[in-house]
Image (cartoon, grey):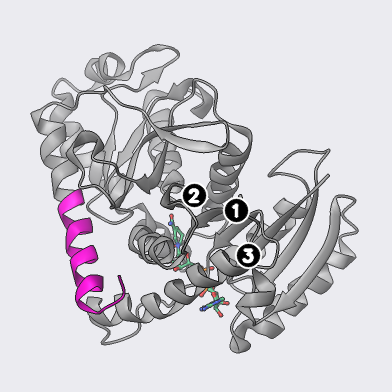
């Protein structure tokens, strides 16, 4: 058996961190061979070709084939999973409209190329920012591919939240479960611990033992730290999150492909009106992956405090959608 994975932005930093983990079998396990298609723009081709040479030198037993191209028709040909990592970063003096427009020019044609060339069951994960709205544009351009097959990465935010809670409570991260990221992969996101557990017990109880006013700690310390973790990494490391972003992408795609069972996680997926999020938006929700599909977990019943934060982030997604509509990208 083998699975074909298309990676855009393969010559970039996250691409470089992802490729060797995919080749090593971290996505689908030790029995599934992989074929890689690395899609770049001409300026990034040499870096992707260099990575392909190193992949060859890695002598990975599971890696069947590597193709490097700047042609989306070739890049998405036969793709079972498309990881859309390449995006246009915000340059100096760029307004939000410029950024949305530049990325619309990437994700619209890529969505169309996926519809035309990928395998009929293709699953698409958007990492390149603004991830939710880029996923929305790609899905809208992929005629015949259900929008449910497109998702945006918010797993890094969830992993960051779990990691910070583990440190706070002095437990291994594997003891923390059930954290949900709501809304946009941006500073407005809402990392929600209302239904999270530590070693199976409600995490709010454990946090209350350390912080009398848990809400104040969440609002003033935890939520901003998670939401601004990307900026913190840049400040400390001098460069943006790379290995952790690649790791979250692996977690997300592996869950998409292999399922989550009863475990809940977070992903940006298309709304059908769940939790009052306008239908059609790609928003982060609590999800499970079942039979190859992301399913939104309903019934978590956010209270007014949580509702306000979810609504704020969803309002930003509505603004982004309206802006790309006004640009004629939807
Ligand atoms: P890099 O600038 O290192 O790499 C991006 C690569 O994409 C470049 O090699 C570029 O040539 C390529 N590219 C640009 N347009 C392309 C196109 N049309 N087709 C194919 N390739 C194209 O950025 P990197 O650090 O790898 O980050 C990649 C993206 O991930 C950025 O948009 C970044 O903002 C986003 N992130 C998203 C995260 C998330 O959680 N959703 C977290 C990490 C990261 O910030």
Mark carried by residue 149: 2
Q: Nearer the viewer, mark 2 or mark 3?
A: 2
Q: Is mark 1 within 8 Å of ligand 1?
A: no
x 8%, y 30%: residue: 304
> Furthest-front residue in view?
144
Mark carried by residue 7: 3
Q: Is 317 contained in the magenta span?
A: yes
Disc 1 packing (10 Å; few <14; some 14–19; many ≥20) = many
The one nearer the camera, 27 or 13, is 27
Give the spatial CA distance, label 3 vs label 1: 13 Å
Q: Is 144 contained in the magenta span?
A: no
Question: Which segment did they paint magenta?
Answer: 314-330
Q: Which residue is mark 1?
A: 122
Q: Measured from the top left, where is residue 64 in percent x and y?
A: 86, 58
> Furthest-top residue in view?
201
Quadrant where the N terminus lies?
A: top right
């Amino acid at each position: 058996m083998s699975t074909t994975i298309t990676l855009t932005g393969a010559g970039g930093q996250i691409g470089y961190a992802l490729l060797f983990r995919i080749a090593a079998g971290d996505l689908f396990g030790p029995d599934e061979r992989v074929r890689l298609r690395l899609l770049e723009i001409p300026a990034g081709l040499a870096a992707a070709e260099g990575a392909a040479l190193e992949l060859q030198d890695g002598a990975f037993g599971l890696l069947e084939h590597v193709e490097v191209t700047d042609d989306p028709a070739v890049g998405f040909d036969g793709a079972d999973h498309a990881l859309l990592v390449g995006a246009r970063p915000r340059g100096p003096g760029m307004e939000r409209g410029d950024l949305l427009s530049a990325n619309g020019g990437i994700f619209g044609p890529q969505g169309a190329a996926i519809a035309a060339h990928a395998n009929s069951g293709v699953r698409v994960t958007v990492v390149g920012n603004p991830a939710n709205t880029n996923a929305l544009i790609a899905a809208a351009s992929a005629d015949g591919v259900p929008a449910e097959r497109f998702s945006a990465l918010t797993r890094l935010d969830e992993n960051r939240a779990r990691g910070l809670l583990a440190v706070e409570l002095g437990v291994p991260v594997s003891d923390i479960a059930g954290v949900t990221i709501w809304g946009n992969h941006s500073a407005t996101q809402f990392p929600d611990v209302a239904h999270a557990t530590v070693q199976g017990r409600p995490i709010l109880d454990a946090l209350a033992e350390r912080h009398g006013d848990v809400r104040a700690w969440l609002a003033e310390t935890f939520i901003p730290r998670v939401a601004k973790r990307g900026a913190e990494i840049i400040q400390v490391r001098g460069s943006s999150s790379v290995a952790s972003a690649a790791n979250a992408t692996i977690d997300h795609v592996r869950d998409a492909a292999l399922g989550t069972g009863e475990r809940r996680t977070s992903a940006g997926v298309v709304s059908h009106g769940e939790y009052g999020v306008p239908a059609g938006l790609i928003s982060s929700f609590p999800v499970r992956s079942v039979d190859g599909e992301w399913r939104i977990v309903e019934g978590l019943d956010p209270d007014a405090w949580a509702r306000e934060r979810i609504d704020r982030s969803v309002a930003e997604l509505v603004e982004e959608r309206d802006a790309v509509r006004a640009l004629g990208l939807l």
